[in-house]
Amino acid sequence: MEKVIDEIVQWLRSSVRDAGVNGLVTGVSGGLDSAVVAHLIQRAFPDDSLAVIMPLNSNPDDMEHAEKVIETSGINHLSVDLTETHQTMYGQIQAKLQAKDAFREDSDQLADANLRARLRMSTLYTVASHYRYLVVGTDNAAEWYTGYFTKYGDGGVDILPLVDFLKHEVKELGQYLGIPKEILTKQPSADLWEGQTDEAEMGTTYAKIDAYLQGEEVPDKDKKLIEQLHARTSHKRNPVKQFHRSR
């Protein structure tokens, strides 16, 4: 495990060197993936790594867990509360849509959630610009394959150190790095709305996605769902579709 972690750390350092920047920044939510990334970037750049906590009507337990990640990793940090910014922005958008009879109640929750993710992305890039840091994403292999991330939100990053690791492998990394037990064992959630969990939203479990990606047998309904998720989210992994005129 130490060898794997050292390989990631060396890759992080070479990514910074190749980009000609000073260090790395990531958002810390109180979840497992961001906790692991915070520990990794702090190892890579003890003096030039930064964790940003971005509460937005967040679960208090998640914010407490985020603070524990800061304590256990020793990473530099700051907190930017986006609650008021989000309320102002989304309130104005809702009002404009309602005035044009274009507001859709069935789309409201997801649109709201995606705006939260994109506000966090914008915050990270604003901070990164001041420090001349790269923005480090937290998506693992299961999330990347199924497209379980917001386009230009938590998917809007410069580098992805965990994208080749299955969810259970990220947990193993977390155990080795000393992530607090309550973070290792909690239900994964993107903190998009009250009571939201990743697996309930996806309709399958990380264990089944991991098994599928390893070539193992999974129930037909889960296999079909995973393949559907992968197919319809290809635009997230290749975000800019370009037209090329004939010559």
Image (cartoon, helix red, strand yellow):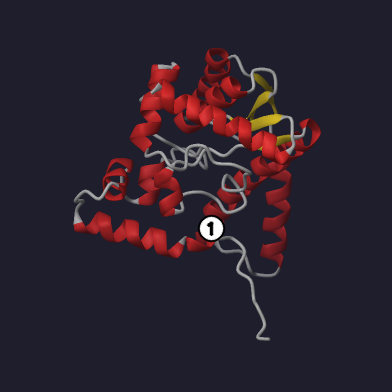
Q: Residue at x 42, y 21 (%)?
A: 2
Identify the image quadrant of residue 75.
top right
The reply to whether residue 183 is visible in this rendering is no
Q: Is residue 110 above or below residue 2?
A: below
Query: Which residue is tagged 1?
Result: 236
SS at circle 1: helix
The image quarter containing residue 49 is: top right
Residue found at the far right of this picture: 130
Q: In the drawing, does residue 237 fall left or right of residue 50?
A: left
For label 1, count other residues whose C-alpha is less than 10 Å away and answer few (under 14), some (14-19) or many (20+).
some
- Give the percent coordinates (x, y) of residue 1: 38, 23
> On screen, 175 above or below 117?
above
Q: What's the residue at 68%, 39% (across, down)?
A: 18
Name the outermost residue toward the bottom: 247
Amino acid beneath label 1: Lys
Above or below, comparing residue 98 to residue 8 in the picture: below
Q: Position of residue 33 (x, y in %)?
A: 47, 32
Determine whether 184 is above or below 115 in the image.
above
The residue located at (71%, 66%) in the rendering is: 99
